[in-house]
Structures are given as structure tokens and as C-alpha cells.
Amino acid sequence: MIDLGVLDYPQVHCAYGVNNSGKVVGQVWAQYQHAFLWAKQYGLKDLGTLGDPEWLMTHEGWAMANDINDRGQVVGSSWAPPTTQQRAFLWSDKGGMVHLGAFVDPSVPPENAYSYAFGRI
């Protein structure tokens, strides 16, 4: 068992995925809920959310990293106002967090509209 450490604010961490090189992804619950990546070389990295960074400075956002492949690509889902839909994302060192597109029919009520990214990349 390895202590993953903590980010700079009080929180709860949940790990959901690990790759063959030992990198771990999951979710940190603090004032906001963000996706995280942990590696032995650099510790915890906050991956943020898909929301507008300016808006997120003062409002809530939510993201969860579900899995990571051996190339270090992370998949998960995120929600941040002004939208009310959860959206699937792919995160990489080069591209950051990228929205994978709208997988939900626009006619679905927002409270029932979400997409998750799981599995192989």
C-alpha cells in the first residue's frame, strides 16, 4: 500500500484506476470535486474539470477520472456550470482535458443527461 498524499486543501480522495507503470487516477472531494492523477515521480496532480476556468474560480465544478492506460491517457466524466450535463473526457499530458463530444440526445432533460468514459483507450 502506498500513501498517495493530499492536495493543498482538506479533502477525501478515491482512487478508481491504475496502469502498469503505477500511475493512479481518481477523484478528490474538497470544496470542489476534481479528477486527479498520481505518479511516484511527481505526486498528486489536479486535473480540474471541463468547466470555464474563470467561472470555476468562484463556483463549483465536478470531475472524476475513471481509468488510465499505459500511455498515460485518462478517461472520465465532468460536470461544470453553466451546463448541467455530465460530459465524457480524455486527458493527456499534451492535450489536457478534452471533451469527447455530446453523446446525449439534446431532448433529454438535463437532470437525466450524462455520459461516462470507461474501459480501454
Image: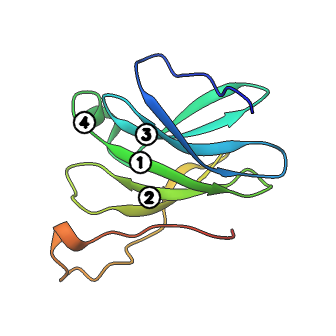
Task: Determine if residue 70 is in view.
Answer: yes
Q: Mark 1 or mark 4: which comes first in sequence? A: 4
The location of residue 45, given as percent across then percent down, is 59, 31
Labelled pair 1, 2 in contact (Cβ < 8 Å): yes
Q: What is the CA distance from the residue labelled 1 to the residue labelled 4?
A: 15 Å
- Kindly give the residue lying farthest to the right in the view shown: 21
Q: Quadrant of residue 40 in the image?
A: top right
Labelled pair 4, 3 in contact (Cβ < 8 Å): no
Labelled pair 1, 3 in contact (Cβ < 8 Å): yes
Q: Judge depth for marks 4 and 2 and give the one in front.
A: 2
Q: What is the CA distance from the residue labelled 4 to the residue labelled 2?
A: 18 Å
Q: Which residue is mark 2?
A: 77
Q: Which residue is mark 1?
A: 63
Mark seen at residue 34:
3
The location of residue 18, given as percent across then percent down, is 71, 50
- Reply above or below: 42 against 69: above
Q: Which residue is mark 4?
A: 55
Left or right? Give the position of 29 relative to 14.
left
Q: Mark 1 or mark 2: which comes first in sequence? A: 1
User: What crowding class fits label 3: few (fewer than 14 Cα within 10 Å), some (14-19), or many (20 or more)?
Assistant: many
Q: Judge depth for marks 1 and 4 and give the one in front.
A: 1
Amino acid marked by disc 4: Trp
Q: What is the CA distance from the residue labelled 1 to the residue labelled 3?
A: 5 Å
